[in-house]
Image (cartoon, helix red, strand yellow):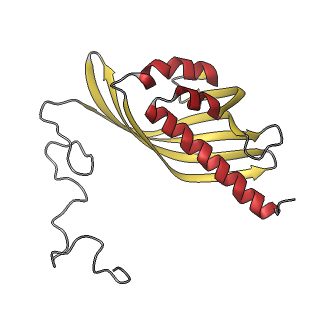
Amino acid sequence: MTDPALQALLDKQHIAELLTGYLRSVDRGDVATLRACYLPGAIEDHGGLFAGPAQDYVDSIAAALTHPRARTSHNMTNLLIDLDGDVATAESYCVTFARIKADGQYYHSFTGARMIDRLERRDGDPRTWGIAHRQLLWDWNHDRGKCPRSRPRPGGLYQESLQPHGIGPGPPDGSSRGRNRPGST
């Protein structure tokens, strides 16, 4: 028998990998892996855009995910997992960049959301965690229409008139960032 504290850490790691794999499957257009993240009978409540069976949700977005011009980057942060036996609740933040097409024009969308997941471990196998219910809550959004003068800048920012954030001339001594700090080599 595994030590309960160790099992809790293993369960949390399996859940974190499941949720990370979910986001990766969306970004890579891997519909089979996305489908496998949900348990049979799972429900998806996607922030007012979709509410119903998770497999129907996957069906509704599969064409967009696999389109050759699809571009998204989902980044999970601030993951909290509460375990209760074979059931867990996870809250994770997600920051997303997406290129979307509407009215014949491409737009860049930068979004922050939270995912509230109820997960279950089924079949007694510690590696069989899956999403039983997902609720997505939108926190903020910034959309930007494509502009002929827009160009990617270092750091991935799309701004015409502002200086790129977080990119400066470097330290006054001319060294590279990260060098000459205490403890660095």
Q: In the rendered image, which quarter is residue 160 located in?
A: top left
Q: Locate residue 122, reporting x and y percent.
A: 79, 37
Compared with residue 108, is residue 63 higher up or lower down, i.e. above or below? above
Q: Is residue 177 left or right of residue 4?
A: left
Residue toward you, 144 or 119? 119
Which residue is at a point 82% across and 49% down the rendered structure image?
A: 85
Position of the N terminus by quadrant: bottom right
Q: Quadrant of residue 182?
A: bottom left
Instruction: Give left or right: position of 25 versus 160.
Output: right
**76 horizontally vs 145: left or right:** right
The spot of residue 38 in percent (x, y) is 66, 31
Marks counted in the figure total 0
Return the x and y of residue 109 as percentages of the image width and height. Answer: 34, 34
Q: Residue at x 81, y 61 (%)?
A: 4
In this rendering, is residue 176 above or below 82? below
Q: Name the residue located 39 percent from the left edge and 21 percent from the top edge.
A: 67
Residue 106 lies left or right of residue 122; in this view the side is left
In this rendering, is residue 136 above or below 161? above
Q: Nearer the viewer, residue 171 or 113?
A: 171
Q: Residue at x 38, y 83 (%)?
A: 183
Q: Is residue 53 visible?
A: no
Q: In this view of the protein, which residue sits in the foreground, 103 or 59? A: 59
Q: Is residue 87 visible?
A: yes
Q: In what quadrant of the picture does the C terminus appear?
A: bottom left
* Residue 110, x across and y down, in percent: 36, 39
Residue 78's place in the image compared with 129, above or below, is below
